[in-house]
Amino acid sequence: MMKRLSLMSLVLAMVACSSNPNEHKPSPLPALPTKAEQVQLNKQHALFVGKGLKVDEVAPHLATQNDKVYAASHDGMVMAIDVNAKAIWQQPTQQTITGGVSAAYGRVVVASASAEVILLDATTGQIQWRKTLLSPILAAPAQTSERIVVQSNDGKVYGLDAKTGDTVWVFDTPVAALSLRGYTSPLVVDDLVLVSNALGKIVALDAQTGIGQWETRVASPDGRSELERMVDIDGNMLLSADKTLYVGSYQGQLIALDIKTKPQIKWQQALSSYQALSESQSAVYAVDANSYVIAFDKQTGKVIWKQQDLAWRGLSRAVTLDERLFVGDKDGYVHIIAQENGKLLGRFKVKGAVVDLAIFNQQLWVYTQKGQLSVWSLSIKP
């Protein structure tokens, strides 16, 4: 509760500054290559999920499992969708879904602003159990075969029994006096679950027992004011196949950690971001707080390129496919960027501000604030 109450001070401060003539304005749409050189995508399907999303709430992200996409709306509708964007089932929960959907082990788990965790059968959508915690949940849960791991807004991390929803363990993480609205989702790595806190640290817990195994600092809360000391880790962490963990933070840095045994820092670079990271074979891609898109070399951390033409356009996280990067903005445009050099290759428009993107079945799925989920073919024509 302290975290959310303290956020009001930040909101008021931002409102007070809204008349500042130096306030950042979204960049105009940047020029594209000639039409013959642009990358074109083709819209295949579209449907709507519930009644859409609220502008002032944390948007629930998409999840994929096997041959389905799972999505949720703020009015509590949870849907399973096939590769042709046809609804397989939909289940009303009467909850304000926040943070996202978790799909694994034949289960779908969502969490709400009313502190409720809900587990559904992935095949039928039937609700198996509901569990009410003590504080709102703003990030998607994580799953192991036996545990549902949830981090609530008061910093508590819960390990719930996957069959019953009963609390097996609780781990407390500290909360900051002032922080962004949100959390990164817990990340399961073998027998561990990694969680973050608003003080810039990552903690590894035994997924079965909740006992702490190690912790490491990603960013230091430096500065004279509470605003300057905000170093939230809100964007989801990225784990590469070689067991390198990439973590970005707000007003902090991007750090690469080798976690094969205990964490060892491979490199770190200055970065302020609250979006999830993405990767290709050789690079990690971040969207920073200015809506710059930045490519970092995976081995050295060196900045390969920085795309600044989309500054302050309220970019979503970026996703990668076929040597291209896709990122959406608050005006409903999806921008196509070359992974090699950051060059803008094209764009298209959808209905509503883009809140999440996913690559599924070799297609781009775009989820918007109006609740539209559209599917775009990646059979790109030069």
Image (cartoon, grey):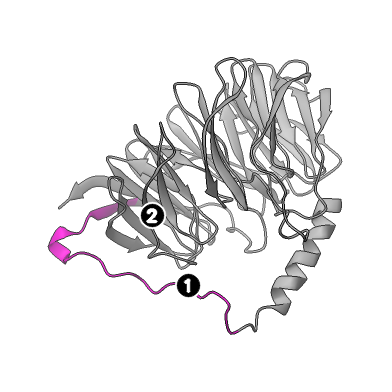
Mark with earlier residue (2, 1): 1
In contact (CB < 8 Å): disc 2 and disc 1: no
Specify the amino acid type for callout 2: Lys
- The residue stretch that appears in magenta: 21-44
Work out whether residue 277 or residue 69 is closer to the camera in this orientation and state it: 277
Question: Dot 1 corresponds to which residue?
Answer: 26
Q: From what the image shows, is residue 166 above or below residue 358?
A: above
Tell how many labels: 2
Work out whether residue 91 or residue 269 is closer to the camera in this orientation and state it: 269
> Residue 258: percent from the left, percent from the top?
53, 23
Res 349 quadrant in image: bottom left
Question: Dot 2 corresponds to which residue?
Answer: 306
The residue located at (65%, 42%) in the rendering is 219
Specify the amino acid type for callout 1: Pro
The residue located at (50%, 63%) in the rendering is 353
Number of other residues with Cα within 10 Å of mark 2, as a class: few under 14, some 14 to 19, many 20 or more: some
